[in-house]
Image: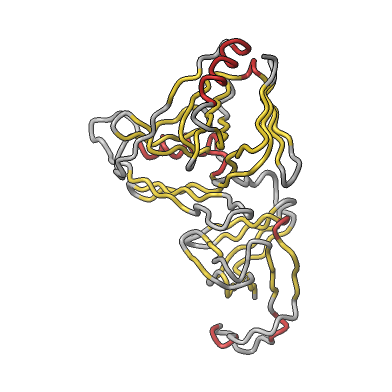
Amino acid sequence: MDFLEYPEILKEEKGGLIPGRLKLTNQTIIFKSNKTGKVDQIQSAEIESIKWLRVAATQGLRIMLLSGTMYRFGGFNDNDHDKLGNFFKTNYEKELKNKDMCLKGWNWGTAKFQGSVLSFDVDKSTAFEIPLTNVSHCTSAKNEVTLEFHQNDDVPVSLMELRFHVPTDPNATGDAIEAFVENVLSKASIIQATGDAIVTFKELQCLTPRGRYDIKVFPSFIQLHGKTFDYKIPLTSILSGTSTYECPNIRVFRDTSRRASDFLLLVTSEIRDTSPVRFGSLVTRSRAITIS
């Protein structure tokens, strides 16, 4: 058989399942999103391994590339296993192996890095996997590493933060926490400041997030740097800005001589009535970033 086609398949993307059509030819795997029309292509020569596992409530494929990138597709039935296995063996010379997931519910185990994927294994079986390209921020404090994630606007529920406790071994030669963070940052999709800022504002008072911040404007994002937290706001997420915002809580500032027109309001696409806005460990339901 030269090709297989499945019209109702789900592709995992930033924690959501995107419906689309999957076509497998003798050289390429093609997925086309029903909503956006975006096409993802995987060349058979780039595939390292293919595994059969549960994806949400259905059967699915886990495709690992030689580059370390992982794809997961769901929506298959149990009887698709043999047909897919024969296709991969005949056309790609790859064996479709079963991958059992751990369902014990334990919150302790072993973190392993494979390519751009972090897997958390319990009793030699995978409990969950995280594509590190979904990580937007990574910080460490004492024995704890915190991962924050890019949000998927197309799903009602999205993972925002995950924390790992990394025990230290006094007999170890290296720093386990530092190694963990370096492994994450090497593959994470994090906004990086390259070159000098276009303009810098020193110690501006912010109402949301509250505190004083050095604000730097870069070509693709705005950075708010404070004593405790450091935020990066992509310019593409800013819907509007105004300097004539009527601030009802002006009394919270020490300098009460400021007028209401002395405040800058930034409205971003991530601020909604139905979902909170996260700034590091601060969660707020404010609809804007207010800068004095």
Q: Residue at x 53, y 56 (%)?
A: 157
The answer to whether residue 175 shows anywhere in this view is: no
Q: Between residues 93 and 115, which one lies in front from this camera angle?
A: 93
Is residue 227 shown above or below 169? below
Locate residue 247, reporting x and y percent.
64, 84
Left or right of 153 on screen, residue 218 = right
Q: Residue at x 65, y 76 (%)?
A: 292
Left or right of 158 on screen, residue 162 = left
Left or right of 220 on screen, residue 98 = left
Q: Between residues 89 and 4, which one lies in front from this camera angle?
A: 4
Q: Between residues 251 and 237, which one lies in front from this camera angle?
A: 237
Locate residue 61, reporting x and y percent.
53, 29
Is residue 289 shown above or below 77? below
Locate residue 198, reporting x and y percent.
74, 55
Locate residue 5, reporting x and y percent.
68, 27
Is residue 4 shown above or below 95? below
Is residue 48 shown above or below 8? above
Q: Quadrant of the N terminus?
A: top right
